[in-house]
Image: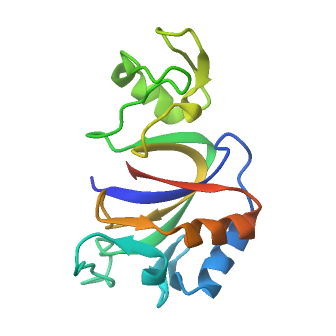
């Protein structure tokens, strides 16, 4: 499975903001193009105005090769009933937000954490109890009830500009963050 760039509202355990307002703001800004199905959008003409790409000539496929092909750069809206953990498995390693210690045994708990990111975890180093959603995943993991996934953009290849996160914040009244993860 490929790793994607996710944009998500903070704080992660609160009820999701009005995502229709977020989608409309991104359409007006040209970040999103036409609707591809009920929760997927083509990138718009202004997409590259809101992303910073590494290297001198990034190559992104912006359209499907054939019917049913989703292996191209597009944006997908995700909505979940409960806070869900997503990580980049080769990179995401949680740390305690209080003392910055790594958390031993975290891989064994991933299955349950992925189902409910509001679960509490006690740091063995400092004893602080923290929700999985509040762990420091170093931008290689996130917990959210809603998010925008930018497909076919990989870690180290591109970052959202502050103006994109600001536009989302203005549209929803919530701060936004980003992380790399698998769907």
Most foreground residue, 11 or 114 = 11
Most foreground residue, 22 or 145 = 22
Place of residue 41 in the rendered image (x, y in percent of width and height, measured from the top left): 49, 78
- Residue ID at (34%, 24%): 107
- Residue ID at (49%, 67%): 76
Location of residue 138 with respect to 33 vertically, above or below = above
Q: Quadrant of residue 28?
A: bottom right
- Residue ID at (46%, 24%): 100
Place of residue 71 in the rendered image (x, y in percent of width and height, measured from the top left): 28, 71
**Residue with the most extreme right position:** 173
Left or right: 21 in relation to 139: right
Place of residue 9 in the rendered image (x, y in percent of width and height, measured from the top left): 64, 54
Left or right: 85 in relation to 12: left
Residue 117, visible in the rendered structure: no
Left or right: 105 in relation to 98: left
Q: Quadrant of residue 54?
A: bottom left
Place of residue 39 in the rendered image (x, y in percent of width and height, measured from the top left): 54, 70
Left or right: 133 in relation to 73: right
């Amino acid at each position: 499975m490929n790793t994607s760039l996710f944009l998500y509202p903070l704080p992660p355990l609160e009820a999701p903001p009005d995502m229709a307002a977020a989608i409309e703001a991104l359409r007006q800004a040209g970040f999103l193009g036409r609707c591809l199905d009920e929760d997927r959008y083509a990138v718009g003409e202004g997409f590259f105005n809101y992303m910073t790409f590494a290297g001198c000539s990034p190559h992104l496929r912006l359209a499907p090769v054939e019917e049913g092909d989703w292996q191209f750069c597009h944006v997908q809206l995700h909505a979940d009933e409960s806070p869900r953990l997503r990580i980049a498995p080769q990179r995401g390693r949680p740390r305690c937000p209080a003392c910055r210690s790594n958390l031993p045994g975290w891989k064994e708990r991933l299955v349950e954490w992925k189902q409910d990111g509001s679960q509490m975890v006690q740091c063995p180093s400092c004893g602080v109890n923290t929700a999985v959603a509040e762990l420091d995943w170093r931008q290689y993991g996130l917990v959210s009830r809603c998010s925008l996934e930018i497909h076919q953009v990989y870690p180290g290849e591109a970052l959202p500009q502050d103006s994109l996160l600001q536009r989302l914040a203005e549209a929803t009244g919530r701060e936004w963050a980003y992380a790399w993860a698998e769907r």
